Image: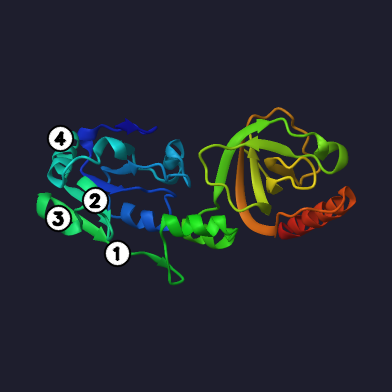
Amino acid sequence: MELIEKSSVKSDITSIAIGGFDGMHLGHQELFKHLDKNGAIVVIQTDYANLTPKRYRDHYSSYPIFFYELHNIKHLSAKEFLVLLNEEFQNLKKIVVGFDFHFGYKAAYNTEDLRFLFKGEVVVVNEFKVDNIAVHSRVIRDYLRDGNIELANRLLGYNYNIEGIHIVGQGLGSKEFVPTINIDVNSFLIPKDGVYITKTTIKNKTYNSITFIGERKTTDQIFAVETHILDSSFTNLDYKNIKIEFLKIVRDNRKFQSFEELKKQIKDDIQISTNHFL
């Protein structure tokens, strides 16, 4: 088990919230509200965690975070899992889980089994909704894949963002169109192909921006994530790590019949994005 960037000792922990917690969204935050001052978050880590990859979770909570890799514990019975928790968190008095929590071998055990097996307090948090929409990571993933950024952000409680490393692009942007910063993104779920109103953070400074995601159908047919800083005074070429926050989709990706047609569309996209920030 790994402690992520928090100074804490397991023997000090008296309450834990258990779950997948991909997204650390508003539904998850409802669980964290039931933790005491010596609380901690226990993440059951799976391959589906791509809204907030492992090392980014602590951005969204002040509680220490501990990770269990699912493949290391999925063979445990319900009783064995509780024994493990009690051995590692020796002063554990409260466990907080969601209404749909399952655990143990083949996820055969539920919240009632947890209440029976754990000798301390068990808090089961009901399904949380925003505007009558159930807040679940899978729902947010679907909205992002559909390009519905605004609704995804409402369920997350923050602007969905990805981080990556600056890479050299095809070079056409600064020569033929507008200068862009190309980004290599790993681990994160990438929203639907298209053009987005965004904010881009470089060296702790955030700029209004417009971001393209998808295959560059009119030029080299290569997939790219590239962002254009709307601030005309931006000239800093000394950057490596880039963060992009998504605010709203402008349009879907499509192929244009000519460079001139593409250039006109880019100009229109930039105007739309600029107007958004006025």
Q: CA separation, marks 2 and 3?
A: 11 Å
> Residue type at mark 1?
Asn
Which residue is painted at 23% across and 34% down in the image? 10
Q: Quadrant of the C terminus?
A: bottom right
* Disc nearest the viewer among 2 and 3: 2
Q: Quick check: 206 left or right of 125?
A: right
- Mark 2 closeness class: few <14, some 14–19, many ≥20 residues within 10 Å: some
Report the disc number at residue 87: 4
Quadrant location of residue 182?
top right
Tags 2 and 1 touching, CB below 8 Å: no
Q: Which residue is mark 1?
A: 126
Quadrant location of residue 91?
top left
Front one among 273 and 164: 164
Report the disc number at residue 107: 2
Which residue is painted at 87% across and 48% down in the image? 259
Of the numbered discs 1 and 4, the one sitting upstream in the chain is: 4
Secondary structure beneath dot 2 equals helix
> Residue type at mark 4?
Glu
